[in-house]
Each structure stands twice: as structure tokens, then as C-alpha cells.
Amino acid sequence: QVQLVESGGGLVQAGGSLRLSCTASTVFTINTMGWYRQAPGKERELVAVITIGIADYADSVKDRFTISRGNAKNTVYLQMNSLKPDDTAVYYCHAALRGSFYWGQGTQVTVSS
């Protein structure tokens, strides 16, 4: 069983920045990690994903968010700049390993106008 532990959410004013972190507890190397988010009353949506150094982003966050892998094994970050009230959601870390998918517990990001 792989556990994902997230940190870094919080309350920020519009235009501000936050950095989310996620670490997966497994001895195996995870090639694909990403971030999803779910706003109240909406479906969970992909924010960003990174696979062996190649990153992909939702159109709504391109040029504002950056996903990266840490030097520590199985760590992923999401740097969020120029935050907007529409970015308010619970953000979930995601990992794919050996055909199985794992989720973190979620961290709340609230952007005030």
C-alpha cells in the first residue's frame, strides 16, 4: 500500500502564491505523479502531471503553475503563482504505480478576492 502525504495548502489573497508538496511512501520509484483538484459542487479535475520529466498542465493553470519532482525519491511539488479565486479547491496528490492509482488525503487551497 502506497501512502501519499500532502502539505502546503492554506489561505492566500488573489495574486499570491502557494507551494504544495507530496511524498509517497514506497520503496519503488514512481514515474508518474500529479495533482488534481475538486471545487465544491464540481468534479475532480487534473491540474498537472509529470512523467519522467515531462509535464502537462490544464489550460486553466498554464503559465501560472509549475509541477516538479524533488531530489528526494517519490516527491512532487506544485508551485502555484498568480492565484485566482477560481483556483479555490481541495488539491489531491496522485501517483500511478504498477497499474494501481493512489491518492492523498487532500489539502485545502482557498484564494480570497
Image (cartoon, helix red, strand yellow):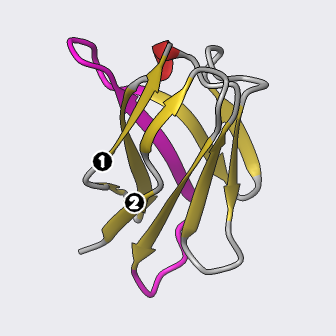
Percent of width and height locating residue 8:
47, 54
Is residue 105 at all visible to an observer of this figure?
yes
Residues 1 and 25: in front is: 25
* Mark 1, residue position: 106
Q: Looking at the picture, does residue 32 appear above or below residue 75?
A: above
* Mark 2, residue position: 6
In which quadrant will I find the N terminus? Answer: bottom left
Residue ranking furthest to the bottom: 27
Magenta span: helix, strand or loop, mainly? loop
Is residue 31 at all visible to an observer of this figure?
no
Residues 112 and 67: in front is: 112
Q: Looking at the picture, does residue 87 appear above or below residue 78?
A: above
Residues 9 and 95: in front is: 9
Part of the protein shown in magenta: 26-45
User: Label 1: few (<14), some or many (≥20) within 10 Å?
Assistant: many
* Residue 22 horizontal side relative to residue 101, left or right: right
Percent of width and height locating residue 88:
41, 23
* Residue 7 horizontal side relative to residue 42, left or right: right
Residue depicted at 59% across the width and 36% down the height: 48
Q: Quadrant of residue 66?
A: top right
Percent of width and height locating residue 111:
47, 25
Mark 2 in CB contact with mark 1 (< 8 angstroms): yes
Q: Looking at the picture, does residue 32 appear above or below residue 27?
A: above
Inspect the image, locate mark 1, and give the three-letter code of the amino acid beneath it: Gly
Inspect the image, locate mark 2, and give the three-letter code of the amino acid beneath it: Glu
Residue depicted at 50% across the width and 13% down the height: 113
Q: CA distance from mark 2 to mark 1?
A: 7 Å
